[in-house]
Amino acid sequence: MAAASSNHFLLSFSLFLSFLFTSTLARLSPQTTTTTLDVSSSLSQAQHILSFDPQSLKAFAQTQTQPLFFNSSTSAAVFSVPLHSRGSVHKIHHTDYKALVLSRLDRDSARVDSLSTKLLLALNGVKKSQLRPLPTQIQAEALSTPIISGTSQGSGEYFSRVGVGNPAKQYYMVLDTGSDINWIQCEPCTECYQQSDPIFNPSGSSTYSPVTCESKQCSSLEVSACRSGKCLYQVSYGDGSYTVGDFVTETVSFGNSGNMNGVALGCGHDNEGLFVGAAGLLGLGGGPLSLTSQIKATSFSYCLVDRDSTGSSTLDFNSGLPADSVIAPLMKSRKMNTFYYIGLTGFSVGGQAVNISPGLFEINESGDGGVIIDCGTAITRLQTQAYNALRDAFVKQTQGLPSASGVALFDTCYDLSSKSSVKVPTVSFHFGEGKSLDLPAKNYLIPVDSSGTFCFAFAPTSSSMSIIGNVQQQGTRVSFDLANNRVGFSSHKC
């Protein structure tokens, strides 16, 4: 009888321990966080951009934008200009969406090679003026503008609408946080590529003024020359693109929000490469000749519309950070003052931290490593170790989705042709101090054809420097608080 009682007690105690262990485990097991990918909407937008006629937006090009005011404590004026995708400015000539994607990815790889080369030269103390020049000859405060997505010619670039000269004429200019020199194609042309607007004619502006060879602006150029006492410039981008011409000062205007006199920019008479559609480039990097530095901006922000969107947003200067911004540290490298380095510490997938080596994304004493944020790169590039860990974590949590063959630089793809929407694990960036940014599903699962193949929009890089690209930034206002060395990310502020 006593033995039966003892056995009953042991059985009950075992069941209690089993229940307690199971309950504790359930409480400790992390819940997978998910977000919904609207497959149908993404495919519909992809199809629409192929047939879209930019002429239908001509009326928009004449509209004015107002700056978005956030938590700006500066007394400087606030300016804003429209920001558009290239597909809404320049007619896409691809009839097949996959061909368009492959063209974009080729161009994006060239962009990444350009940035990596730029860093490598800086780390090794090599100046561009020491390189063999291109075989070409030259023939004789606070502001804001609109932003457009630049994917129609296979680029990951965005265009802003600004005025140049006095009286001002409006031009679409590539937005570039990875370079400093502002430039525009100019008459007379030795070699000019096709652009959406008429080419700028200096003789029609009363404020056009050549820069002298002795000026500070001329001496700040990486590659310069002198002709009849006037400064000449050359900028090459490492991907074969370049611009050569006269270095001048001119009036730059930002819609109806103001203008800035005496902005140093290149008047390019010989321009070749991957800029088709734009009249030139706005350099928003951290160097002394960038637009942000010249107008002494305390902050600037942009919101990049979806890459296949025909809509627009704004580029704003001195407007401050939205109150709900997720804040990350903004850092500079002693070797490369152009790039904006960001304090990325890691990722999570589905609410679970991805295991990567501590300090993997830090900049070392020689200026190697780190993570930059760049609006000109489309696909985020991560050091191979970090990419593999992020990809594997995502694949582990998406085993229920039908897989598809890889496409170009994407090795993780899915066949979602039978689905109108699907729940996927949330991918988040972590910035330390408990700060994290949850990405929308469409910012990391993107269509690569019209039939429903979607790929994980990250890629590995052999470079020590990682890059957060514009696909991951789209639909988010990214604010660079230059005065306080921080970057803010805010959704729904476009």
Image (tube, helix red, strand yellow):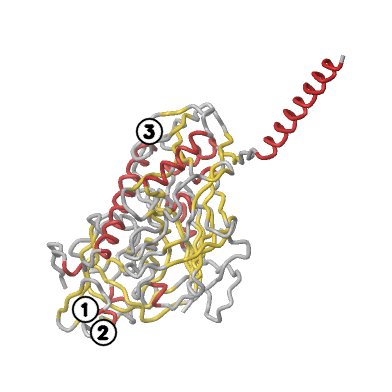
Residue 215, which numbered label?
2
The amino acid pointed to by label 1 is Cys
Tag 2 and tag 3, C-beta contact below 8 Å: no
Q: Is residue 41 above or below residue 433?
A: above
Rendered-image quadrant of the N terminus: top right
On the picture, is 436 further left or further right than 386? right
Q: Residue lying furthest bottom in this view?
A: 214
Per the model, the C-alpha gap separating discs 2 and 3 is: 52 Å
- Compare marks 2 and 3 and give the one earlier in the sequence: 2
Location of residue 366 by image quarter: bottom left
Q: Residue at x 23, y 84 (%)?
A: 212
- Closest to the camera, between mark 1 and mark 2, is 2
- Compare marks 1 and 3 and give the one earlier in the sequence: 1
Per the model, the C-alpha gap separating discs 1 and 3 is: 49 Å
Q: Residue lying furthest right in this view?
A: 1
Q: Residue lying furthest front in this view?
A: 2
Asked which secondary structure carries label 2, the reply is loop
Count neighbours of disc 2 (C-alpha within 10 A) and say few if under 14, some if 14 to 19, many if 20 or more: few
The amino acid pointed to by label 3 is Gly
The amino acid pointed to by label 2 is Ser
Q: Which residue is mark 1?
A: 231
Location of residue 364 by image quarter: bottom left
Per the model, the C-alpha gap separating discs 1 and 2 is: 9 Å
Image coordinates for residue 86, horizontal then vertical, percent: 40, 53
Q: Which residue is mark 3?
A: 406
On the picture, is 292 further left or further right than 210? right
Q: Nearer the viewer, residue 253 or 20?
A: 20
